[in-house]
Every structure is written in structure tokens, then in C-alpha cells.
Image (cartoon, rainbow, N blue to C red):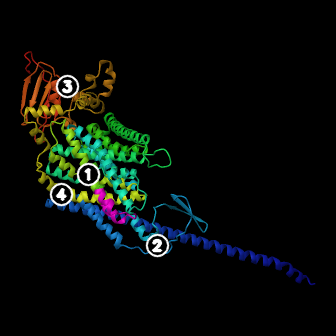
Amino acid sequence: MPVNAKARNATAPRVSKTVSSVIFLSLLICMCATRAEDSGMDNIVTEKKAEESHRRDSADLLIFITLLTLTILTIWLFKHRRFRFLHETGLAMIYGLLVGVVLRYGIHVPRDINNVTLSCHVNASPATLLVNVSGKFYEYTLKGEISANEVNDVQDNEMLRKVTFDPEVFFNILLPPIIFHAGYSLKRRHFFRNMGSILAYAFVGTVISCFIIGLLMYGFVMLMKQVGQLGGDFFFTDCLFFGAIVSATDPVTVLAIFNELQVDADLYALLFGESVLNDAVAVVLSSSIVAYQPAGDNSHTFEAMAMLKSFGMFLGVFSGSFALGVATGVVTALVTKFTKLRDFQLLETALFFLMSWSTFLLAEACGFTGVVAVLFCGITQAHYTYNNLSPESQDRTKQLFELLNFLAENFIFSYMGLTLFTFQNHVFNATFIIGAFLAVFLGRAANIYPLSLLLNLGRRNKISPNFQHMMMFAGLRGAMTFALSIRDTATYARQMMFSTTLLIVFFTVWICGGGTTQMLSCLRIRVGMDSDQDSSISVSDGAERKSTKQESAWLFRIWYNFDHNYLKPILTHSGPPLTATLPACCGPLARCLTSPQAYENECQLKDDDSDLILNDGDISLTYGDVTVSTDGSGARVNAASSVPASDDALDRELTYGEHEQVIRGTRLVLPMDDSEPPLTLARIPPTRGGEPA
């Protein structure tokens, strides 16, 4: 064989191997390029979907902003025209209903052809799913249960679910400013004057209302079961839970009209105080009912030990939440007192805001109730911390929480109207709805009338039948009832409760709230009276002054002395120095806790600090051997006094017709009336005859 032929035969395999390698590499490169292109396309599709979702979320939020804007403009029109037949919350609900109708029946998103329905058998619905699609894992979160007949309309339901918020949004974001504002703006003078009656209505009355409603609703549930209208389980504990959530009153509409018309201050205090406290009681009561767990397999049978355990939980949660709220307020007061934050008003306001809001979250994280904690935090902040703030921060905090309360409350009422059409699992039953309205009416009556009869046995200033009828009429349901009912809608019973609760709120806000002015006229309740004028009129004779003295609870009298002599000096810059009230052995501690401002202005009563017991009527100030008295006209009368103040002086101080405030200091600035300059006392050395020099 020739040499060239042998060479060609030897190089042929090498060429074929090289060609094969090139072809393989080319195919590999093409495959990688194809995969990279596919991955790039997937990323582009994902980015487009994320951008589209972002736009939808922005549009959903814009819907609620538009609702609030329309509500504000309509409120201005109503106030300008002096229309009182519909409150701003009722307007917000109407606008929410209109938008809900449009979203439900007017907007239909085309069904996405990429939706895939697969069946798999699991014992429970997982909160997160990891789905393997062609080797790639995707994470999906649980949004809720969909009924079998709505599987083909998932995309349309998705549009409605976009405007459905997580119930925790209401509890952690919208409720705290509403509840805090209620405690921060509390008119403590009239609240403490009627404190016994308010506590009776809020605690005893709410429990009575809960059980009356629960028993009546259980009868209607049994009737529904007999006639075959019950489509799921509905136990007695469910009925009690329904009684607890609808016992939370929210007469925001009535109180707004009361404030505008200047209705009797005691009636306002009774309604406002009851609504503030019974919201807290209803929250704790509903939690205790949910926690009812008897031994055995059947968790819905009656067991005395389980009931006592739930009652103990009620007391423990309420007292723990109360202590936590007060403690947070005390810490804030100490921080604002012993630091120079008042020199930086923005930081001062920010700290006040964060400490107040964190009270709610801290209570919820510790297993307590944030509503109770933030309510008493607001009362403590108003009583102590407010006095340590700079004037700018005082105005800022008032306006800030007033604004947040307004926006949050109207947002919730707008959302109520919206959910009537956007909520996917409504259960409306005519028998249950009629029974609920009847039970709510009877439960409110069992709260107001028997308790008023018992309270009038110990009150000199009786709760008149007209006031009782007005309180019965003003038992509106609102934000708290809605928030409690929407928090859990997983079962058939809770879904029926939520749907019925919406109708109760609509009826009470529109009918009862809209008829407040007419009811006031029908019951002939006086309007157009300022609270101070009302107080001065009601103590026009000695008998009324004596009755006021008797109505000042001995427990509150002891509390006031302790607060004025010890707590106020420790937590604020006002009050007598601790060096004058604590024993001599506590001298170093007293000097450490007393601020320099306390020495400069001893026993100063600033703004609402005197609202607990003092009015702007006749006031007499005893200073050493000199008593300086002021009447309603602001005239000053000096009189000699050679005897120290006695227990009768405290009695006169606690009455709101004429007051005496004993002071030991260098200067007292006591604001009297908005139209009069404050009364300023300087040190006046006494002479031998007891007359001032």
C-alpha cells in the first residue's frame, strides 16, 4: 500500500472526531442559549406580572382614598347646610356600598387561561405551598377557601379579594388610634363624676347584654334547626360569642350630634364613658368565650370548672392589660419629665406617638388585649405625660390623634359598605337576622333600665327616664363590632354572624344615628348648654351642693389626695414638691424626684388637670392665713383665716359648685375662663392682725 494512502487512513478518524466535537459543542451552546433565552423570557413575564400586581394594588388603595375624599367633601356640604339627619360615618358606608356594587357587578376581569386546577388529598390547608413546575419551585400563599361552584370564577374573585383586607389590619393599624383617642380626649371631670354609673353600665350591663342576646339567639338557632334552615354547626358558645361582639356599642354618630348641640354633660359622659369601656369589656369577654374549653371530646358542653376558668381568664386579661397600659403611660411620663426632649418638639411628638402605639402591640404580643391597654394608656398619657410636653407637642399630639381617629373611623365604615358586596362567604338567614335585631333590642333594654333603677337608689342626681330612653336609643354598633366579627369568618356560624352584624351596624347608624335630633326633641332633653354652665346651674342651691358632696365617692376622694400629693409630683412638673409631702426620712429621694419646675410653680393646675373635680365657677384659694376667692365674674375677695384647712375644706374642694384649693408655694397660675386672664398669686407675708401686708 502506498504511504500517502496510509496517512489518509490514519487522519480520517481524527477529522471525524474533531467534527463530532464541534457539532456537540455547537448543540450544547445552542441549548444553553435556548435555556438562557427561556429563563430571560420567564424573568420578563414575572416582572410584568409583578408590575401589573403593583398597579392593581395602587388602584385598590386609590379606591379607598377616593371614598374618604368624597366623604370629607360631603361632610363639609352637610355642615355648611346644617344637615344632621346623616352622620359622616353613614355617608362613608353609603359610598362604600356604591363602590362595592360597581366592583361586584360592573367590573369583570377576563379569565386567565393559565389557571390550572389540580386535586390533591391533604388533611389540612397549608399556609404555604411549594409547587414544582418543570424543575422550578414556586411559592404560593394561602388566600382563603373558595366554594366549589366558584372555582371557574377564580380570576373575578381575585379582583374582589384584592379589596378585602387582612382582619389583622383593623386590629393592629386602624383600631389603636381610635381607642387611644377615646382615652386621650376623655373629659375626666364628668367621667369621674359619673364613674360608678359608667362602670356599672360598661361591666355589669355588657355581661347582662351578652347573656341575654346569647340565650335568645340560641332559641332562634334551635328553631332554625327544627325547620331545616341551619346549614352547619351552631353551638351555644357561638351564640354567646355573637352576644359579646354585638354588645360593644359605638355611638359615634350620637355623640357627634350631642357635642354639636351641647346636650347635657352628664348624659354625654354616661354614653361616652360606657361606649369607651364596654368596647374593652366586649373584647375581653369574647376572648374568654372563645377560650372556654371543657374537658372531654365535646368542647361545647357546660362545665362549671371550665366556666370558672374562663371567668378567671377574663379578670386576668383585663387587669393585665390595664396594668400594661398604665405602666407604658407612666414610663412615657418619666422619660418626658427627666429628659430635655421638650427642647426638640419633633422628637418629643415622635416618641409620644410610638410609645402610645406600641402599647397595643406589646399587649397583643404578651397575650393580653391591646384595646384595654391602649385605652388606659391614653387616659394615663392625658393625665400625666401631657403636662410634661411642650406647648407645641401638646397641640401636635391632640391634632395628630384626632386626625388619625377621623381617618381610621371613616375608613372602617367605608370598608363596611364595601364588604357587603365584596365578601365571598356571606350567609344571610331571615330567621337569624330577625332574631338578632330582637335580641339586640332586648339586650340593650336589659342593660339600661334595670341598672338605671338600681343606680338611682344611690344617686342624688337621678338618671331621668328621658335620659334612659336616649341611652337605649343611642346604643349604636360600629367599628369594634365589625372588627370583632370579621376577625374570624372560617366557619359557617362565624360567616352568618358577620353578615348579620353588617346589617345591624347599617341599621343602627342610619336609622338610630339619623334620628338622634328628632329623638332629643321628642324626649324634651335640653340642648344648647355648655358643660360648665350646666354645672353651675345644677348647684344653684345648698341642697344640690350637698348632694354633689355625697356623690363624690370616698374612694375617689382618697385617690385624688394620693394622686395630687404623690403621683403628680413624681410623674409631672406640677403638684406640691415631694419634699413637702413625703416624710423627712425620704428627703434625698424626694429631692431627686422633684423637678426644679415644681419649686418654681408649686401645685400648678394646668389645662385639664383640674377637670377631675374643679369647674370654672366659684373658686376659693387658701394660702397660709389668706383666702383669695373668685366668683363667676372673676372678682377677687381677700379674707383672713386663722385656722388651717380641715376635712370640710376637702369636701368643698370635691364639690363642683364652690371649690377650695389649699396651696403652699411661691406662685399659682390657675386658668379660670377663656375670656379672663389667669389669676396669679405672689407670696404675701401675713401681718400680726391676720390681714395681708
Q: Position of residue 347 (x, y in %)?
A: 33, 44
Query: Pointer 2: what residue?
Result: 152
Q: Earlier in the sequence, mark 2 or mark 1?
A: 2
Q: CA distance from mark 4 to mark 1?
A: 20 Å
Q: Earlier in the sequence, mark 4 or mark 1?
A: 1
Labels 2 & 1 near each other (Cβ < 8 A): no
Crowd class of label 1 (few under 14; some 14 to 19; many from 20; radius 10 Å): some
Quadrant location, the N terminus = bottom right
Residue 665 - label:
3
Location of residue 426 with respect to 322 vertically, above or below: below
Kind of residue sitting beneath label 3 = Gly
Crowd class of label 2 (few under 14; some 14 to 19; many from 20; radius 10 Å): few
Residue 515 - label:
4
Q: Secondary structure at mark 3?
A: loop
Q: Answer whether residue 61 is magenta in the image.
A: no
Q: Position of residue 608 (x, y in %)?
A: 21, 39
Location of residue 234 with respect to 670 vertically, above or below: below
User: Is residue 678 visible to us here?
Assistant: yes
Residue at coordinates 31% horizontally, 47% vertically from top-left?
Answer: 279
Q: In the depicted view, which residue is nearer to us: 561 or 537?
A: 537
Kind of residue sitting beneath label 1 = Leu
Q: In the depicted view, which residue is nearer to us: 677 or 341?
A: 677
Kind of residue sitting beneath label 2 = Asn
Q: Earlier in the sequence, mark 3 or mark 2?
A: 2
Labels 4 & 1 near each other (Cβ < 8 A): no
Kind of residue sitting beneath label 4 = Gly
Q: How many marks?
A: 4
